[in-house]
Image: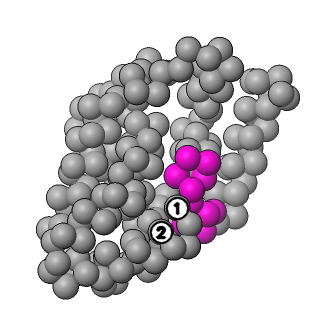
Amino acid sequence: MNVTDDGRLREAFRELSRGRMDALEVIWGECAERLHNYAFALTASDDEADDILSEVLVRVARRRWRLRLVRDPKAYLFAAVRNAARSRARRKPSEALAEGEHPARAAPDPQAVAVRQAVLGLPGEQREVIVLHLWGGLTFEEIGLAVGTSPNTAASRYRYALSKLRQALGDE
């Protein structure tokens, strides 16, 4: 997402808060793939990720009046996905992330498989920051808002994760 995308997302949040339900389509179009990737990184299940996205979209629609108070729509959505994933994990035990398979993203390329395994091997907080920054396109400030930490902590987790990825992948 770039600045233009952020502007469309902010406008869609404003419109939805005014009761324009068609703004959900804009929100979905701007964020669905990245939110799904994030949900998958948290759950290791394509089905769980789909369920989480549906749950978040319904929750956003039901609580649309609150959207006027949202400072950063992108961070808000990623935080909502994170919270929904955590709620689901508390309600039922989940399988280890490394055991999950994402059929649409399974890559036969050995290098891609090695990167995927290295990312899956990171501690949860570091993996989360890597996914949010590299695949979610969030800044460290947005990551901090999404996960409830400071931007400096998010950046620090990112640096630690990169270091571990370099070790795991042999500095390539």
Give the percent coordinates (x, y) of residue 20.
17, 78
Q: Secondary structure at mark 1?
A: loop
Using the numbered discs, state the Cα–Cα distance from disc 1 to disc 2 in whole angstroms.
5 Å
Q: Residues within 10 Å of mark 2 (few under 14, many from 20)?
A: some
Note whether residue 70 is visible. yes
Residue drawn 75% across the image and 48% down it: 159
The extreme right residue here reads 171
Residue where numbered disc 1 is placed: 1
Comparing 109 with 37, the one in front is: 109
Residue drawn 40% across the image and 66% down it: 76
Quarter where residue 117 is shown:
top right
Quarter where residue 144 is shown:
bottom right
Marks 1 and 2 in Cβ contact (< 8 Å)? yes
44 to 14, vertically: above or below: above
Note whether residue 144 is visible. no
Classify the position of the C terminus by image quarter.
top right
Give the percent coordinates (x, y) of residue 72.
45, 74
Quarter where residue 142 is shown:
bottom right
Residue drawn 74% across the image and 40% down it: 162
101 to 47, vertically: above or below: above
Residue where numbered disc 2 is placed: 5
Would you say residue 119 sits in the magenta stretch?
no
Could you tell whether 31 is left or right of 98 in the image?
A: left
Classified by dominant secondary structure, the portion drawn in magenta counts as: helix
Which colour style is shown? one colour
Residue drawn 62% across the image and 17% down it: 109
Q: Secondary structure at mark 2?
A: helix
Give the percent coordinates (x, y) of residue 169.
76, 24
- Magenta residues (range): 133-144
134 to 98, vertically: above or below: below
Tell me the amino acid under the disc marked 1. Met
Tell me the amino acid under the disc marked 2. Asp
